[in-house]
Amino acid sequence: MANIQILVVEDEPLIAEDISEYLSNVDYTVAAIAFNKVQALLALEKQIPDLVLLDINLGGNLDGLDLAQLINQKYHTPFIFLTSYAHKSILDQAKLTRPMGYILKPFTERDLYSSIEIALYNFAQNAQPRNFNLEKLNQQLLSPLTEKEFQVLQDIYQGCTNKQMAEQHFVSVNTIKTHLQNLYDKLNVCSRSEAIVKLREMTF
């Protein structure tokens, strides 16, 4: 569960399958695939992902825009719009929901990977508390973080994948997953995005 978890909301099964394969190829985990707004909300209630890939035009209407508003209001996790439409009116509506990206179909695996990397980085950077350090953070936690766990937390703010963290710290991916799970347990969260939101709500 310590991998970056991504919810795919796409009403075309073949496209959803392609996206799932792309994500698996680049060290991401598909938390769930939803084909409509109702399935997406059920998936979000079950587990808040680190990122949502969200088709604007679900089932022939613009349910993706409504879902984006709900994500902002209740789940506070970043999302990237997927769409075949580039009409100005739709773009204007999409901008109001403050997405972390906007990908036009068809797209390549590299397009998707780049957009996700940038989105995760920007979300984390925008939410990072100023002037916080390990000592200040541990004053607010029942179980203090270790130095290693705090390093992993800082890597989260850089949008790093587990593989990137492992390479930077010269350890295995499994070691990084262990640090991440310990971090989640101490913050009482289940994902990177939840950790970021919780830290943003703390006072430093």
Image: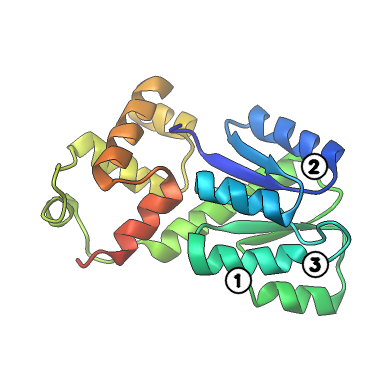
Locate residue 74 relative to residue 16 in the image: left or right.
Answer: left
Q: Secondary structure at mark 3?
A: loop
Q: Quote the CA–CA distance across marks 1 and 3.
A: 16 Å
Q: Quote the CA–CA distance across marks 2 and 1.
A: 23 Å
How far across and how far down the image is residue 5, in percent?
A: 54, 40
Residue to which mark 3 is pinned: 62
Rendered residue at 57%/62% (across/down) = 71
Rendered residue at 76%/47% (across/down) = 35
Q: Amino acid at mark 3?
A: Leu
Task: Point out the frontmost of discs 1 and 3.
Answer: 3
Q: Amino acid at mark 2?
A: Thr
**Coloring scheme of the render?**
rainbow
Rendered residue at 36%/51% (across/down) = 195
- For label 1, count other residues whose C-alpha is less than 10 Å away and answer few (under 14), some (14-19) or many (20+): some
Rendered residue at 52%/50% (across/down) = 45
How far across and how far down the image is residue 1, in percent?
A: 46, 31
**Which of pointers 1 and 3 lies earlier in the amino acid sequence?**
3
**Which of pointers 3 and 2 lies earlier in the amino acid sequence?**
3
Q: Quadrant of residue 95?
A: bottom right
Q: Quote the CA–CA distance across marks 3 and 2.
A: 24 Å
Q: Secondary structure at mark 2?
A: loop
Residue to which mark 1 is pinned: 98
Assess whether mark 2 and mark 3 are in contact (beta carbons under 8 angstroms): no
Q: Amino acid at mark 1?
A: Arg
Q: Is residue 115 depicted above or below 149 in this figure?
A: below
Q: Is residue 197 depicted above or below 66 in this figure?
A: above
Residue to which mark 2 is pinned: 108
Locate residue 184 relative to residue 158 in the image: left or right.
Answer: left
Q: Is residue 169 depicted above or below 125 in this figure?
A: above
How far across and how far down the image is residue 152, in percent?
A: 32, 39
How far across and how far down the image is residue 147, in percent?
A: 19, 38
**Which of pointers 2 and 1 lies earlier in the amino acid sequence?**
1
